Every structure is written in structure tokens, then in C-alpha cells.
Amino acid sequence: MNKDEALNKFIFMMEYRNLSSNTIHMYQWYLSKMFDFYQLEDVSILNISMAQNYVVHMKQTYAPASLNVIISAIRYFFDVVLETPLSRRQFPNILYDPVEITVFTDEQIHLLLDTNDVRLRAFLLLGLDAGLRVGEVARLKVSDIDSKNMLLSIHKSKRGKSRKVPLSNALLNALRKYWIVYKPDKNGYLFPSVRLNSKTPYINQKYINKLFRKHIKQFSFYVPSTRFHNLRDTYATLMLKNGCNIFTLKKLLGHSSFSSTSRYIKYDISDLTQAPVLSSLMEIE
């Protein structure tokens, strides 16, 4: 099987499974890079040793989180295209300490939202007030806004999952102000592409990230690792701190497992100050 046939089958199987367009694009790109690395024409000669050596090579360039995406792409390719599944024991993920979560303070949130750019403010509130990922912001459609029931619909996001989240008055007002200025097509995407020859009809998420970084660089609390996803981190942490239970938060964030949601628990320490200590329980002085 040549590489073009293999990639076409790979894309078909990902679309069949309803993986998100972003996942399909990433997986296809990473596989193409591996084919180029080995200068493959016949991909049927790929084996586990070649896959492992390629990951070792990519460790020079990519962080562990990105390496695990590459590993997932290769593992899925071996499964659905080569029909020789790789177990996690044979081809395990890379172990690493997760990136620390950045949570903005109340003061920092007010500073971030103090902007006259109505589109940027809409982006910021979609992350802070609805917990959306940057890709979910980019792919929002006008029809996803349900002002009657005060809900936002997110369709086929990470791992093809869809969900609804509450639409606050503050966010609705920000979206209406954006609408007045930008007037998007009511039957199309809320944030259409800014490029005439774009491959997608909606705004590129890299463009949103670029705007966010440019905006936050003016503040003293900016650090190079700051990213748009920290708005979602802040949303999740503050939701827990203010009484939202982890089961509801899991649904709001669109997580597949509690392990993804539970990482936010350690950043809410409000209950720890009320916890008893051994010496007081046993009357030790």
C-alpha cells in the first residue's frame, strides 16, 4: 500500500469514527511527517521498531504532550490501516509532569476584559465564562447561540463529543456587541475566517491564540507559557471553588473521563483551611 492510499484510508476511518476535524488534521500531518522521515513509498513495511525510533527522534523537537499525540496517531494508524494493533505495553505513552495550571485572579480577569476590541472580548468571555477550548470558539456557529434558553451548543469537539453550556448575560451582551460591529452571516460561522483563501470558513484558532498573546503581553502577570487555554483553566477552577460539583463540571468541560476533570481539584484549596488537624482532634499541645 503506497502512502497516499494509506493516508486516504486513515482519513476515511477517522471521519467514519467522527473524530474532530482538528484531530484528523493533526493525525494526518504527524503520519505524513513519519512517512517523509523514512522516505516511505510502501507503508506496509512499517513496524513497531520503526515507530519507536521515530518517537525517539521526535523527542529532540517536541514536548511530551505533543509526543503523546504523535504516539496516539501512530497507534491508531497501525490499528485501522495496517491492521496490526499496538498495545500500550508495546508502544506506551511518554511519562511526564503535566504543565502547571494557570488560574487568573479576579483583578487579572478584570484587566483582561478591559478592552474596546469587541471581538477579543467575546473570545475572552467564551473562554472565561463558558469554558470553551480555543478550537471550540473558532468553530462556533451563529445557530449555536440559544438566547431563548440561554445555552451555547458545542458540536463535535474533542473526540467528536458535543455538549451544551450555560450562556450568561455578560457573554450574550458581548456577543451582541460583536455582532453589531462584524455582522457575521446568520447562517454561518460566528467568527468567519479573516483570510480570503482560507481552507476553512471559520477563523483559525492560531489567529485567536495570537490575538490573546498580543493582548496579555501588556500586563505584568504575563509569562511566556501563558496561553488561551488558561482561560478555560480559570473557569474550571473557579467553578469548583464556588460550589460546582465535579460531575457537573465534567459535563460542562466535555471531558471523557474524571481524570481530566480531577486535575483542577488540587487548585481549589478553599476547603483545606476548614479541615481538622490531628493535634486538635487528640488535644495535643
Image: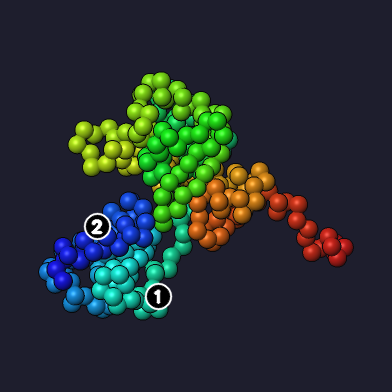
Q: Where residue 88 is drawn, which disc sits there?
A: 1
Give the amino acid at mark 1.
Arg
Residue 60 seen from this side:
no
Rendered position, 200 above or below 271: above
Above or below residue 217? Residue 43 is: below
Q: Quadrant of residue 78?
A: bottom left
Q: Quadrant of residue 96?
A: bottom left
Label 2 element class: helix
User: Quadrant of the rendered structure where residue 39 is?
Assistant: bottom left
**Marks 1/2: CA distance?**
22 Å
Q: Nearer the viewer, residue 41 or 273?
A: 41
Q: Is residue 263 left or right of residue 177?
A: right
Q: Residue furthest right?
A: 283
Q: Which residue is mark 2?
A: 29
Which residue is depicted at the point 71% across and 51% down? 271
At label 2, the amino acid type is Trp
Residue 237 can be seen in this image: yes
Q: Is residue 10 left or right of residue 68?
A: left
Say which quadrant the C terminus sits in: bottom right
Residue at image location 33% in from the left, 76% down from the top: 85
Q: Residue at horizontal 32%, vertical 51%?
A: 21
SS at circle 1 = loop
